[in-house]
Image: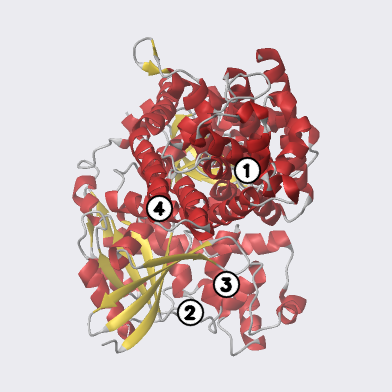
Amino acid sequence: MRTTINSLKKGEKAIIKDFDIDIIPLKLLEMGCLPGNTVELLQIAPFGDPLYLNVNGSHLAIRVETAKEIEVELIKIKL
Amino acid sequence: MINQNINIALIGNPNTGKTSVFNQLTGLNQQVGNYPGITVEKKIGFCKLPNNVKGNILDLPGTYSLNASSIDENVVIELLLNKNDKLYPDVAIVVTEVENLKRNLLLFTQIKDLEIPTILVINMADRMEYKGITLDIPYLEEHLKTKIALISSRKGYGIEELKNLIVSYKSIPTEACLNASSIAPEYFNSLRKAFPNQLLYKLWLVITQDVNFLNLERKEIQGTFTKSHSDLKRLQQKETIKRYQFINDVLKEGLQVDASIAKDFRSKLDRALTHKVWGYVIFFAILFLIFQSIFEWSKIPMDFIDSTFASLSALTNSELPAGVLTNLISQGIIPGIGGILIFIPQIAFLFLFISILEESGYMSRVVFLMDKIMRNFGLSGKSVVPLISGTACAIPAIMATRNIENWKERLITILVTPFTTCSARLPVYAIIISLVIPDTYVLGILNLQGLTLMLLYLLGFGMAIFSAYILNIILKIKSKTFFVVEMPNYKLPLFKNVALNVVEKTKAFVFGAGKIILAISIVLWFMASYGPGKKFKNAEAIQLSKIENAGISQDELDNKVAAYKLENSYIGIMGKTIEPAISPLGYDWKIGIAIISSFAAREVFVGTLATIYSVGSTGNDDTIKNKMAAEVNPVTGKKIFNFASGISLLLFYAFALQCASTIAITKKETNSWKWPLGQLIFMSTFAYIVALVTYQILK
């Protein structure tokens, strides 16, 4: 199954893999949302949307509908 | 003596403390205006630099990159691409923040490509120790090809060093710090060959952005070098990746973070402020606190201003020689000015709270908290900011909708914002509430008048949300939705920034609205002091000849004459003409005049009544409020401002669109007359019906 940002749990970190460039706004790319960068889900708003992320050191919030388009790979926490 | 003038452009991401740097450099030497033709705020400040150099500092709107997505951001590009602009910078200052250096540097690398001498300011350096950050300044200066000023606009250090760097701007390298054109070498090489005299990055900006570039025909480039939208975007993505790679490489050496030192206060606060229960409780508690305090705290200065102007008016009347000019001053101009100045306390408090909420970073959390809820009504979480700042004034609020990316959400926000209770309604509410709602306390602590005011605010919000819901169903607009909001770090608001903002906004309000109010007051005075026909001219004789007036004192007679004159003056005739339309709402012709004149701007209401009541009375120093309270309907014998007519009037002002400036700004922002006219007709009809029904039920 494809893992996207919206399927992360609170506190989980992942690496951004790929997304459809035509859907994702340029502004999000400029905020550091680019393939290879890390993303951490910090908070989920009440009612499940939007999502509060730390992307490449930048703190920002996006809606679930956008988060669904961004494929990521979960970073396994070493025990 | 001034030897030299240099132009300095201050550029930076939002939330980097750019405005604090501007305030530190310029102090009170600031001018705020607009860019010609658009309503983007233009701030210029002046600063004395070493060696008798004078700096003209332009504070450009905050932007994340040179890829513009709003008119505010466009201003930045247009200035930087146009060498002939008289504000074209000799030196650019890019303000960044130490904790977000990586993202902030993206804009810096773009500015460097324009080959303007660029100074890098790293702000909030006082937080480095706390966050465990160390910087290798010489390394960064070498690789970013710039000079760095490490400053703290909060603590005020580093500013002198920055001034010294500005003066020696000629020694700052102008070369780019990376070669962005390597993302598509063939494309950029042919572009370079076609326009050998132009800067490559400028050409690229002209191709990708919708900006005017004076030196070059747009068509010329577009023919051969245009690509499809998605191809261009792919290249822009490559460019962004390339820039970030460069930044990451530089920062790997130049910036060290010791994570063990960093303390995280932010995530704790975030958890509380965006909590599914406490988040909302805190938000509404803050709103409640704001409205209670606006009403309570501004009472004393407002009463003081009111009574000062009443006695000033009486004083001029008795001290100056009697005549038309004295009447104009004491009955037209002084009450008119008083009617403007009385708003200052409440407006200042409102702007104070709004700028504290913005400065502290709390506003972004509210956006986050409210987005899902607001979307049910066709709005965005970002609509909360316009709706809250709409409580100060709809004009800046409508301008603040520019960062809503989705056009439908933005349009709905623009259309419903005028329902929120703006500061111009406040004096109207204040005076009517104080006349018809008793000044008592419920549950021991809640002031009933304050509570009524709060209800009116809630009603404004409620109506805004309700009409948004209706508009969301009616409007059939499809637009791509996306939503990105930065969550800045929490900051203690800086006194200097907040104070300057409050002073500036209050000043703009007093002088902007003040001119209209003063002009209308003078016109009203003339119309109330003169009248057509014999009735006005012979008022004294007519009153003397009346049988019921036989044997009354001279004072009483004077009052009767004055009242009779007013009724037969130009304004009296106008008011009497519309009286049939407004008497079902519980208003007399005097209120009718005030309503007509407040279609230019609502705040005129109080001033108009002040003028009308001053004309009627000779030399008594009663306040406007007392005069209004004493006003009796000659037919029914009941007070004019009673509970039913007062509530009806409150509701009329809550819903009617009585503001020429709002109509103008809606026209500008939506680029069509359709929306502002629809807004005007809908809101005013609705207001009339609600006021009518209310009065008929309550009376």
Q: Tag 2: residue type?
A: Tyr
According to the image, label 3 marks what residue?
Answer: B78
Mark 4 crowd level (few <14, some 14–19, many ≥20, 10 Å Cα): some
Residue type highlighted by circle 1: Glu
**Mark 3 → mark 4, Cα distance in angstroms:** 53 Å
Disc 2 from disc 3: Cα separation = 10 Å
Chain containing the residue with disc 3: B
Q: Secondary structure at mark 3?
A: helix
x then y, percent, for residue A30: 51, 55
Respond whether the residues carrying marks 3 and 1 are from the same subunit: yes
Residue at 44% across, 74% down: B112
Label 4 belongs to which residue? Answer: B316
Q: Position of residue B106 (x, y in %)?
A: 45, 62
The numbered mark 2 sits on a residue in which chain?
B
Q: Which residue is mark 2?
A: B88
* Front disc: 3 or 4: 4
Chain that bears disc 4: B
* Tag of residue B540: 1
Quarter of the picture containing the N terminus of chain B is bottom left
Q: Quadrant of the C terminus of chain B?
A: top right
Identified at 37% across, 36% down, the residue is B303
Tag 3 and tag 4, C-beta contact below 8 Å: no
- Amino acid type, callout 4: Thr
For residue B260, which quarter of the picture?
A: top left
Q: Nearer the viewer, residue B279 or B189?
A: B279
Q: Is residue A10 left or right of residue B534?
A: left
Q: How far is mark 4 from mark 2, CA to CA?
A: 52 Å
